[in-house]
Image (spheres, rainbow, N blue to C red):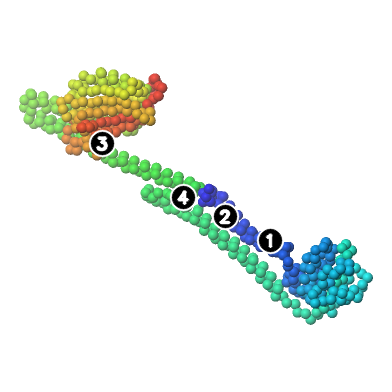
């Protein structure tokens, strides 16, 4: 998981931890390095003491090394390294050292006589195992270890302190400056890390929030074309994805609303046009009767018959429009039944064959499966079949048209119904439009009696309520094919009718 995908709470805790951890580790590492160098390095601790407390002169450092030399003499086990180390530190202060074990010389300062050093050390209080004389003229010290039989002497013209000595505090100032420098480096490191983490958090948190605020302003002003990019998988990323989902839903709702507004305007225009034409006819025939143009009984009967036929067409148009509106609003109750669509269509065609032959349409039925169970409303599905057949009758080319109905089982557990006629068909670019309300291939819409343009729109609404899908294709060599896919009901014999 990337750091930017961590929850914001964890990232804030991590940044605060880093801001404290790195300076602390810097100081801890520096302290450990100094400690290890003092512990394991061959460093003159007396020089360090003199460096830290220069006002004490060399007194404190010499006392420190004399004490350490005594301890190492008591711990002597055959190795001279530690004794030589302390001796070297004393020699750096101007002293001379001689070390014996019994009568065997172990170490002495170069350019000095070991016996002379021992003799000078034992001139005062020779009977004592440890004695020191340190005055303004010099230092004399000797020691005999009861544990290891190691004896050593330290002499030198090193005064304990000069009364007129001026103490140089430069070394202590250097130490203070070094301490201030380390403190300043740690402070600058903390500030730098804090600024870097603040900038990093600004990039990771503040900038996405600013972008989200700008997008929210765009959405509030109706601009839904700006996508919300979510690069992280933290709380802000989840919020951005939620905003993007909201934006897409609002955009889809806006497109649907615009489509509904467009359909409503087309519906009003279609109703106005399709009602104005028959009304004009009725008005014309009525004026002909009033003005005496129909001056014979035959003409008057013809005029009255035309008024009656036109009124009936208007009534059918209003009923179809009312049905379409109720379907669009979901106010038509559906009574669902699980039926065998093959048996249903076979019985329907057998019963209505003579009627449709009288209308000039010859029906035929084929099926690729013996049984196909679907859930339909019998009344509404009959309206689907009748509207499709009526559409083929209206646009047939010959005295008798042919409509072939085919049932087949397709993949995804669906049953496909195919209605294929041999009429003139429609152009390819119009195939997706014939299911729209008031759409007719007759752009002039002069013959209202041939249809309102709502028949296939009603079919589309009913099929959608049945959880199906409908589309149109061209029949080869000519004609129109309407395909309907309905979900197949597996293992059901009969279901109780319920209201949708």
Disc 4/disc 1 C-alpha distance (Å): 43 Å
- The residue beneath circle 2 is 15
Percent position of residue 82, x then y? 78, 65
Percent position of residue 498, x then y? 39, 24
- The residue beneath circle 4 is 231
CB atoms at circles 3 and 4 under 8 Å apart? no
Which circle marks residue 431 in the picture? Answer: 3
Closer to the camera, 460 or 426?
426
Residue sitting farthest toward the front: 104
- The residue beneath circle 1 is 32
Q: Is residue 497 above or below residue 423?
A: above
Disc 4/disc 2 C-alpha distance (Å): 20 Å
Label 4: few (<14), some (14–19) or many (≥20) C-alpha neighbours in 10 Å: some
CB atoms at circles 1 and 3 under 8 Å apart? no
Name the image quarter holding residue 409: top left
Of circles 1 and 2, the one toward us is: 1
Name the image quarter holding residue 365: top left
Kindly state the secondary structure of the residue where label 3 is placed.
loop
Kindly state the secondary structure of the residue where label 1 is placed.
helix
Q: Is residue 56 above or below residue 444?
A: below
Of circles 4 and 1, the one toward us is: 1
Tell me which label, 3 or 4, sits earlier in the chain. 4
Tell me which label, 1 or 3, sits earlier in the chain. 1
């Amino acid at each position: 998981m990337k750091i930017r995908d961590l929850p914001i709470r964890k990232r804030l805790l991590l940044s605060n931890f880093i801001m404290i951890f790195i300076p602390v580790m810097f100081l801890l590492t520096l302290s450990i390095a100094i400690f290890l160098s003092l512990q394991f390095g061959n460093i003159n601790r007396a020089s360090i003491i003199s460096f830290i407390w220069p006002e004490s002169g060399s007194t404190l450092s010499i006392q420190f090394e004399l004490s350490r030399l005594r301890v190492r003499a008591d711990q002597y086990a055959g190795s001279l390294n530690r004794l030589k180390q302390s001796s070297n530190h004393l020699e750096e202060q101007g002293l001379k050292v001689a070390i014996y074990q019994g009568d065997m010389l172990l170490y002495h300062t170069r350019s000095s006589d070991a016996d002379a050093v021992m003799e000078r050390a034992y001139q005062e209080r020779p009977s004592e195992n440890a004695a020191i004389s340190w005055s303004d003229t010099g230092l004399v010290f000797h020691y005999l270890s009861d544990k290891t039989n190691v004896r050593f002497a330290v002499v030198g013209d090193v005064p304990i302190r000069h009364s007129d000595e001026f103490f140089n505090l430069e070394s202590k100032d250097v130490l203070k400056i070094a301490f201030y420098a380390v403190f300043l480096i740690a402070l600058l490191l903390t500030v730098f890390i804090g600024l870097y983490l603040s900038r990093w958090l600004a990039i990771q948190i503040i900038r996405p929030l600013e972008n989200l605020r700008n997008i929210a302003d765009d959405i509030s002003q109706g601009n839904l074309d700006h996508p919300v990019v979510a690069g992280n998988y933290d709380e802000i990323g989840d919020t951005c994805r939620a905003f993007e989902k909201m934006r897409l839903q609002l955009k889809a709702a806006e497109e649907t609303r615009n489509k509904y507004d467009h359909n409503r305007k087309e519906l009003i225009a279609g109703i106005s046009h399709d009602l104005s034409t028959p009304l004009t006819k009725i008005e014309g025939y009525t004026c002909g009767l009033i003005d005496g143009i129909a001056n014979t009984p035959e003409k008057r009967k013809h005029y009255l018959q035309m008024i009656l036929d036109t009124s009936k067409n208007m009534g059918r148009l209003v009923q179809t429009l009312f049905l379409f509106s109720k379907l669009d609003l979901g106010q038509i109750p559906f009574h669902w039944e699980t039926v065998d669509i093959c048996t249903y269509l076979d019985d329907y065609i057998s019963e209505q064959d003579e009627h449709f032959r009288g209308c000039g349409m010859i029906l035929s039925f084929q099926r690729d499966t013996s049984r196909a169970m679907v859930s339909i409303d019998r009344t509404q599905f009959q309206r689907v079949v009748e509207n499709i057949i009526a559409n083929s009758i209206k646009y047939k080319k010959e005295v008798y048209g042919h409509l072939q109905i085919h049932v087949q089982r397709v993949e995804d557990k669906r049953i496909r119904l195919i209605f294929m006629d041999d009429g003139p068909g429609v152009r390819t670019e119009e195939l997706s439009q014939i299911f729209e309300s008031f759409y007719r291939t007759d752009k002039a819409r002069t013959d209202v009696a041939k249809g309102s343009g709502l028949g296939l729109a009603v079919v589309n609404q009913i099929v959608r309520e049945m959880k199906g899908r409908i589309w149109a294709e061209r029949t080869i060599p000519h004609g129109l094919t309407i395909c309907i896919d309905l979900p197949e009901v597996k293992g059901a014999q009969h279901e109780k009718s319920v209201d949708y």
